[in-house]
Image: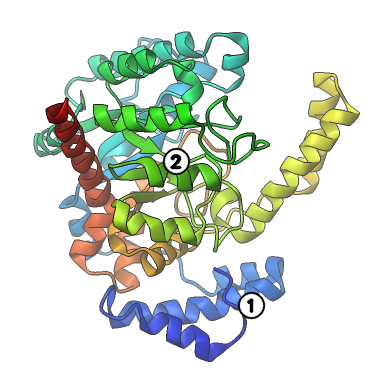
């Protein structure tokens, strides 16, 4: 968060937090804001000093017990794509009941992390739209998720509703939900959208990296100023179905348009706060404030490039450099070599768990504790903060939230209660839409 250097203004801003997360968090947040103010003056060195001054998290028995008693729902895991990339599409060759060091995720560590609900991303690259294979490859990814659930029926079960999630968790299994990452998958067809919902998809990210014919992306040139008329129709159809509208990856104008159109809560399945880390993939404060009447939830991404201020600046520069190098080196191999050289000279700052929880704090301050959750992006990113290296690490977040003064019920909302409430609300809206028809 950029707050300037006026201590009195900082104190006044933080007094508004009292009663939301308690006096203990107030003291912590004030200290954090002073540290963030220092970051604005000397980003790299100040960042490292600030993190060095904050202790490593050690999970206490109290935190471990609270974590076990909570329904932990992660909004975004890219294991299906990693399986596809590494050619491990057969569970005869890959046993998820054993530790898989090449991945962030396996069933052993999901249990250790206390994950009770998991949105599996069925991502395929935006380039598949240009090749005309987006839908086919998305269907293959959905089939892979179903195959994984069928292979491990004692541990996993498909959830198609909020009630399913709570039932499956109560029976000691991990509730598996499906998220389509990128509206290019529907190939401009509402009929395809309905088909994906029928196969179990319970959210769709409106765009991925590329601007579509009906929605602007955060990481591509805008063409529409947000959503087109068809884009608005997509949002309304998702409301009618009970599918969560996911605004990760979309431009700020698309976020605002979707919030204007949607009659159900929206989610950001794996995004963070732009005021803390200034990257276009993150959510501006004005959009955070609009989540309050909408009932939506920002599920905080763990990727260092979106949560660590230095790394976010590096990410924006990376996008600019990549575009320039592509012009200089049209052929793929020279381009990749040149970009790799730049990346080696500009490594990503990993940061720590504190950087991630700073984003939770910020969303709480701006929108309230009912509007934040967790969306790790495990197996979809290559650099993660210290103490958030894989799916076993979720208890560290519970511990850090306790340390910052959050109450038990607030922590349980952050861990999964908020997104479950958003899904339940989307189902209620869908029921009302069906009644009207």
Q: Quadrant of residue 177?
A: top left
Residue 263 image label: none
**Side (left or right) of 111 relative to 57:** left
Please report the residue visible at 25 percent of the width from the left and 45 percent of the height from the top.
Answer: 422
Residue 69: x and y, percent? Answer: 15, 52
**Residue 8 versus residue 240: which sits nearer the camera?**
240
Q: Seen from this angle, which residue lies furthest bottom?
A: 8
User: Which residue carries the number 1 mark?
Assistant: 38
**Residue 303 versus residue 359: which sits nearer the camera?**
359
The image shows a total of numbered marks equal to: 2
Residue 52 appears anywhere in the view: yes
Q: Seen from this angle, which residue lies furthest right?
A: 328
**Residue 48 versus residue 332: which sits nearer the camera?**
332
Residue 339: x and y, percent? Answer: 79, 35
Closer to the chain start, of discs 2 and 1, is 1
Please report the residue visible at 59 percent of the width from the left and 53 percent of the height from the top.
Answer: 350
Q: Quadrant of residue 171?
A: top left
Which image quarter is the N terminus in?
A: bottom right
Q: Nearer the viewer, mark 2 or mark 1?
A: 2
Check the image and report above or below for 436 versus 84. below
Residue 417: x and y, percent? Answer: 22, 50
Check the image and report above or below for 259 versus 200. below
Query: CA gap, disc 2 to disc 1?
Result: 31 Å
Which image quarter is the C terminus in?
A: top left
Q: Are marks 2 and 1 in contact (CB under 8 Å)?
A: no
Check the image and report above or below for 93 versus 405. above
Quick one: label 2, few (<14), some, or many (20+) residues within 10 Å?
many
Q: Secondary structure at mark 1?
A: helix
Q: Secondary structure at mark 2?
A: loop
User: Which residue carries the number 2 mark?
Assistant: 247
Please report the residue visible at 25 percent of the width from the left and 78 percent of the height from the top.
Answer: 19
């Amino acid at each position: 968060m950029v707050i300037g250097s006026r201590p009195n203004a900082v104190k006044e801003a933080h007094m508004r937090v009292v009663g939301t997360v308690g006096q203990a968090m107030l003291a912590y947040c004030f200290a954090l804001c002073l540290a963030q103010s220092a970051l604005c003056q000397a980003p790299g060195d100040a960042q490292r000093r600030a993190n060095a001054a904050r202790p490593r998290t050690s999970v206490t028995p109290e935190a471990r017990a609270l974590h076990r008693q909570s329904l932990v729902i992660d909004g975004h895991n890219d294991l299906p794509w990693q399986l596809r990339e590494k050619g491990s599409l057969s569970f005869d060759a890959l046993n998820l009941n054993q530790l898989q060091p090449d991945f962030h995720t396996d069933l052993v560590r999901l249990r250790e992390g206390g994950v009770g609900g998991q949105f599996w991303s069925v991502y395929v690259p935006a380039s598949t739209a240009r090749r005309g294979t987006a839908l086919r490859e998305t269907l293959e990814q959905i089939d892979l998720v179903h195959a994984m659930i069928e292979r491990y029926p004692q541990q996993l079960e498909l959830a198609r509703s909020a009630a399913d999630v709570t039932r499956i968790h109560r029976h000691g299994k991990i509730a598996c939900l499906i998220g389509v990452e990128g509206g290019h998958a529907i190939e401009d067809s509402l009929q395809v959208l309905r088909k994906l919902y029928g196969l179990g998809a319970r959210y769709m990210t409106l765009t991925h990296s590329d601007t579509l014919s009906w929605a602007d992306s955060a990481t591509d040139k805008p063409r529409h100023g947000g959503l087109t008329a068809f884009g608005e129709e997509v949002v309304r159809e998702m409301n009618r179905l009970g599918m969560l509208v996911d605004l990760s990856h979309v431009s700020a104008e698309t976020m605002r348009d979707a919030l204007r159109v949607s009659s159900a809560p929206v989610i950001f399945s794996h995004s963070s706060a732009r005021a803390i880390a200034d990257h276009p993939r993150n959510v501006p404060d004005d959009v955070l404030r609009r989540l309050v009447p909408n009932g939506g939830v920002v599920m905080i991404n763990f990727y260092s490039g979106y949560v660590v201020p230095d790394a976010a600046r590096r990410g924006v520069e990376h996008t600019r450099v990549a575009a320039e190098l592509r012009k200089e080196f049209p052929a793929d191999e020279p381009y990749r070599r040149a970009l790799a050289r730049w990346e080696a000279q500009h490594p990503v700052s990993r940061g720590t768990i504190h950087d991630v929880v700073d984003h939770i704090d910020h969303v709480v301050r701006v929108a309230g504790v009912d509007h934040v959750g967790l969306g790790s992006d495990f197996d979809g990113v290559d650099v993660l903060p210290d103490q958030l290296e894989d799916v076993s690490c979720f208890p560290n977040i519970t511990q850090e939230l306790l340390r910052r003064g959050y109450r038990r019920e607030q922590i349980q909302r952050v861990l999964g209660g908020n997104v479950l409430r958003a899904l339940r609300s989307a189902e209620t809206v869908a029921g009302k839409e069906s009644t009207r028809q």
